[in-house]
Image: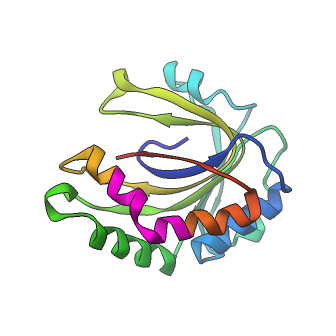
Amino acid sequence: MYSRGLVFYTPRLAVPPRTALLAAADTAGTRRVAWATRLLRPDAQWEALLNQDRDSHFVQEGGSIEDCCDDHIPGRPLAVGFAGSSALMALADAIAAAVPAEVVGDLGWAGFNAVVGPHDIIDFGTGFEDTKRIALAQFSFGLSSNTSPADWSRFKECVFRTPEIRTLQDQLERTFGPLQRWASF
């Protein structure tokens, strides 16, 4: 469900969906929600993407993560975008300080988000023809980006070496166990 940015994910959800969403909110540093969407049928993100047919339902604009927890339907992904995160600004500043100027290019972060329920982690590459499915996840936590690095591979390497990214992953892993990570900028 991610097009650009950094994502931590797991193929198995070891905690109830409500616990997952509340832990994601704690990691984001906010209980405020900008938006929430849910697929109307069991996930077929990869197939839907290929067929240009994404069947989703906007379930909430604004509100709290607690309100969103009730919108989860087993077997269908619920995606939540967090609003007003002070943790986002601190992380963005840490990344900007860790990446050399010649690597950065255009640097911008859209926000934290989480998805609970079966969903694809998709890498859009440099265009639709480069698109590939990375994994099927049951939970993911992401930092969405509208970044266009001057050097994509070095940027990704610098981001993953940032201590604040490791801290973020450690915080998530206390709830979810070991997580895989992916980045596409």
State the residue at coordinates (32%, 29%).
Answer: 127
Asked if residue 182 lies left or right of residue 105, the reply is right
Is residue 82 placed above or below 158 in the rendered structure?
below
Q: Reply yes or no: does residue 166 show up in magenta.
A: yes
Q: Quadrant of residue 125?
A: top left
Q: Quadrant of the N terminus?
A: top right
- Most common secondary structure along the magenta stretch: helix
From the viewer's perspective, is 46 left or right of 91? Answer: right
Indicate the colouring scheme: rainbow
Is residue 146 visible in the rendered image? The answer is: no
The answer to whether residue 140 is seen in the rendering is yes
Q: Position of residue 37 (x, y in %)?
A: 64, 49
- Count up the numbered dots: 0
Residue 39, quarter of the rendered image: top right
Q: Residue at x 42, y 79 (%)?
A: 90
The relative height of residue 118 versus residue 62 in the rendered view (above or below) is above
Image-quadrant location for residue 20: bottom right
Residue 160: x %, y % from top left? 42, 57
Give the percent coordinates (x, y) of residue 26: 67, 74
Residue furthest to the left: 102
Does 123 appear above or below 129? below
Relative to 30, say whether 36 is above or below.
above
Which stretch did the figure color magenta? Answer: 157-167
**Residue at the spot 21% in from the left edge and 58% down from the top edge:** 104
Near-viewer residue (12 or 36): 12
As rendered, which of 169 and 4 lies closer to the eye?
169
Q: Nearer the viewer, residue 65 or 166?
A: 166
- Would you say residue 34 sits in the magenta stretch? no
